[in-house]
Amino acid sequence: MTRSGNGPLTGVRVVELGNFIAAPTAGRILADFGADVVKVERPRTGDELRTWRLHGGDVSLLFRTMARNKRSVTLDLRSAKGQDVARRLVTDADIVLENFRPGTLERWNLGPEEIRRVNPDAVLVRISGFGQTGPYRDRPGFGGVAEAFGGLRHLTGYPGMPPVRTGVSLADSVAGLYAVIGALLGLLRRRAGDGGDTVDVALYEAVYSLMESSVPDYDAFGVTRQATGATIPGVVPSNTYLCADGRYVVVGGNNNAIFDRLMRLVGRADLADDPELTSNVGRVRRADEIDEAINDWTRQRDSREVLTALADSSVPSGPICDIPDIVADEHFAARGMHERHRVRIEGDETREVVFPGVVPKLSENPGRTRWLGPELGEHTDEVLAELGYSAAETDDLRAEGVI
């Protein structure tokens, strides 16, 4: 494999065996920063993500985003010959990513022991709904299930209303971030001469890690957090406020000094000077009164005026942007978060489309988008040739449906 880009992970070789969001998120981040990521997909159908949110053509822009900078190889992992090709891929890999149900790799003769046999130094990153151990390990678990089981879904929405979810695959994306962290930690272990490692990321644990002090608060004080709508419990003021033009803004005035500036801005010097409100503890007891004071001020002004005044007073605030707002915003553009790439839409039709930029930003060795998510099997012949397969052997594998 020779397609590493210029970046801090140049020379790192990754085999991505996963589908959907979680493992591909990890693979995308590694590829963004120079790793050579070979994405293994099923022959003929490929990753099901190719047809998720398909608004036209035969490959979704979701897939083009998630699979950017990767090479696509088709391979039937259920076949003995496909497993043999996979082992040869793994032999040359630094990191192996997968997000199948526990036991799947083992059934395909590609489990940790087999990977260690062919490549003792490989870092195997395994992502699943409930982890590789424990009584629930065999349960299927997508991101929405993990968000519910990990406690997050209980806190979203408003009191007395059905729980809601965010409109993105939050659990999968967070698990992908932890997978990258685990992979990089594994590479550090290997650099120290300790060999490879296995990273076990559970979707529900990725969500659980976001739950702050919910468990110790319950265990120590019997406090069970509940859904609170647009506020953060125990932090005042931090809420969403309606403006005269019908738009909402988010305001965070919960720092003591910021609260003082905010109250004077909204014409409530009496609250700024109230000794009980100089700390968050007192403000929590009078949250409704404080929110009403801010609401009285925002309702008389349009959102642009509100946000300008808040920024001038150094009060953290911002609009609630929809996607057209984001695309039009100058700050996103100035930070390189809007990248324009020409992409095939349908048939031979191509179009220049805005895609999200690379995160995080590195000043000296930044990541970049070298190409968008590839066509199914676009790099199969190339990668197999690098593994030592002749053109005739590749043709035979294709004729047998292995690739």
Image: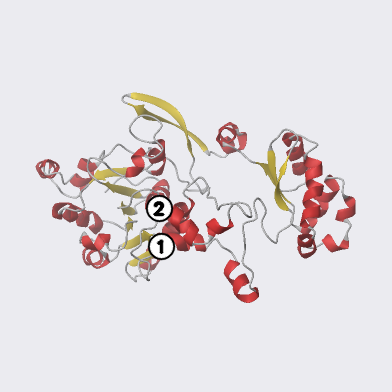
Q: Is residue 119 visible?
A: no
Disc 2: CA contacts within 10 A as few (<14), some (14-19) or many (>=20): many
Q: Secondary structure at mark 1?
A: strand
Q: Residue at x 81, y 42 (%)?
A: 297
**Image check: 127 left or right of 119?**
right
What residue sits right under mark 2 in the picture? Answer: 22
Tell me where residue 286 appears, x and y as whole percent.
Answer: 80, 59
What residue sits right under mark 1 in the picture? Answer: 201
Q: Is residue 203 visible?
A: yes
Q: CA distance from mark 2 to mark 1?
A: 10 Å
Q: Nearer the viewer, residue 55 or 278?
A: 55
Q: What count of labels does the image hold?
A: 2
Colour pattern of the rendering: secondary structure
Screen quadrant of the C terminus: top left
Amino acid on which disc 1 is placed: Val
Residue farthest top in this picture: 349
Q: Earlier in the sequence, mark 2 or mark 1?
A: 2
Disc 1: CA contacts within 10 A as few (<14), some (14-19) or many (>=20): many
**Do labels 2 and 1 touch, CB within 8 Å?**
yes
Tell me where residue 299 appears, x and y as whole percent.
Answer: 78, 39
